[in-house]
Image (cartoon, grey):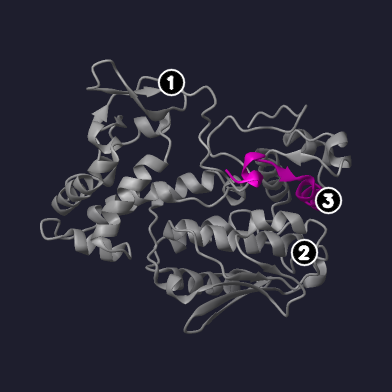
């Protein structure tokens, strides 16, 4: 595991910035601190690190209590709920390109505070962001947050991490420069002519994968989801299920059709299903979702049976009768209440497998700096009730 994911913490810099915004808006700073379990000692120590839940709660309360998603850092106020209205429109777009064009149009109509521009070339696309009144954001707090959101939210929409070539920022190099590898998985260049996210143009044709129900669950976790590391390997099953549900003629759909929609070959789709099934730790939440079972097929554990599993997966996918969760799996009832991993332990007769609970196996489908699953690590001496 990479070192910066093992800490699962956030720099105190961000908490100070958001708390200062609350003070400038005339909010009760002590109430903000209590809500996020912050103490004066934590805020004064430059070495302090916070649990992402703390930062998310602080940001959420500042936005809600101030009724401004821009936290007073833009030319006009954006009342709390504007992002929700936009998100509800974007899931009905066909592609990432259409969603970004709709985002630009939406912000131009609703507020004159933020301007998005999209410049597509043959190889790379630039998504530029400009604040109408940059003097209101002298510390670049809102600019930095918007750049983060508009990489991570579009990635969530297409259920695939958008690879960044670079991120350009007009600001001078900040003191918290060391945090940027955690924010953007690419080189960050400062003192640039404009703020821009740069990614390959082929990503603009990626289809929007999300449903209304998925968006509802996502919005319930905002802004915490903005501070999580992007990771969508577990979404392959959902994407296939979504395609099958919306297929007009299920009897005629083939594995090649599904693979084409996923921008991969049929052989790759089956291969990825096999690899991803082993890569994702199984938790009780995953066990109870869908079939209510843990996957465990004895043949799948052995390396020599990979080819057979891929062929078996192709046959099931062609039939359109089972999701990729079952391509290389047979249901076995879960036996542990907490997070578990499927290990290669045999019973004495070697005919069954069993889920074995690991004493240290917290599922690390990591957030930006945190694990996805509770309990989340909190700052020392800062009890927080999410």
Question: Vertical placement of 238 versus 175: above or below?
Answer: above
Question: Looking at the image, which residue is at 71% across and 45% down?
Answer: 10
Image point (46%, 68%), residue name: 99
Quarter residue 349 falls in:
top left
Does the magenta portion include 336? no
Helix, strand or loop under label 2: loop
Q: Is residue 6 magenta?
A: yes
- Point out which mark residue 337 bears: 1
Badge 3 or badge 2: first in the primary sequence: 3
Question: Which label was assigned to residue 140?
Answer: 2
Residue at 23% x, 35% y: name it.
299
Local secondary structure at mark 1: loop
| Picture coordinates of residue 364, whole percent (x, y) | 53, 38
Relative to 282, 174 lies left or right: right
Which region of the structure is painted magenta?
A: 1-23
Query: Could you tell me which quadrant the C terminus lies in?
Result: top right
Quick check: 253 above or below 202?
above
Which residue is denoted by mark 3 in the rendering?
Answer: 20
* Camera-side residue of 209 and 303: 303
Are dots 3 and 2 in contact, CB under 8 Å?
no
Secondary structure at badge 3 equals helix
Q: Residues within 10 Å of mark 3 (few under 14, many from 20)?
A: some
């Amino acid at each position: 595991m990479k070192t910066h994911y093992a800490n699962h913490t956030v720099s105190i810099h961000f908490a100070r910035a958001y708390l200062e915004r609350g003070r400038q808006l005339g909010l009760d700073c002590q109430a903000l601190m209590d809500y996020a379990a912050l103490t004066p000692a934590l805020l004064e120590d430059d070495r302090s690190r916070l649990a992402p839940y703390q930062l998310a709660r602080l940001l959420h309360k500042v936005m809600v209590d101030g009724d401004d998603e821009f936290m007073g850092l833009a030319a006009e106020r954006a009342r709390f709920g504007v992002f929700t209205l936009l998100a509800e429109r974007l899931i009905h777009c066909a592609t990432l390109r259409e969603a970004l064009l709709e985002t630009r149009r939406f912000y131009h109509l609703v507020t004159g505070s933020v301007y998005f521009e999209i410049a597509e070339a043959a190889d790379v696309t630039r998504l530029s962001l400009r604040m109408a009144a940059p003097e209101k954001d002298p510390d670049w707090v809102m600019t930095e947050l918007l750049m983060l959101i508009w990489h991570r939210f579009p990635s969530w929409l297409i259920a695939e991490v958008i690879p960044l070539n670079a991120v350009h920022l007009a600001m001078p190099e900040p003191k918290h420069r060391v945090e940027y590898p955690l924010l953007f998985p690419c080189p960050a260049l400062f003192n640039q002519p404009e703020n821009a996210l740069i990614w390959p143009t082929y990503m603009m044709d990626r289809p929007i994968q999300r449903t209304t129900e998925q968006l509802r669950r996502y919005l319930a976790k905002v802004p915490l989801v903005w501070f999580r590391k992007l990771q969508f390997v577990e979404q392959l099953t959902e994407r296939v299920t979504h395609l099958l549900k919306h297929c007009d003629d299920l009897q005629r759909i083939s594995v090649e059709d599904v693979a084409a929609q996923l921008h991969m070959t049929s052989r790759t789709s089956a291969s990825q299903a096999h690899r991803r099934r082993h890569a994702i730790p199984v938790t009780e939440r995953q066990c109870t979702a869908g079939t209510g079972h843990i996957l465990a097929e004895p043949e799948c554990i052995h390396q020599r049976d990979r080819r057979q599993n891929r062929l078996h997966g192709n046959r099931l996918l062609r039939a359109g009768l089972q999701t990729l969760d079952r391509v290389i799996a047979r249901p076995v009832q879960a036996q542990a209440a907490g997070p578990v991993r499927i290990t290669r332990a045999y019973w004495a007769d070697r005919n069954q497998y069993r889920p074995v609970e690991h004493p240290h196996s917290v599922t690390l489908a990591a957030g930006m700096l945190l694990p996805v699953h509770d309990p989340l690590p909190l700052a020392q001496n800062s009890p927080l009730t999410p």
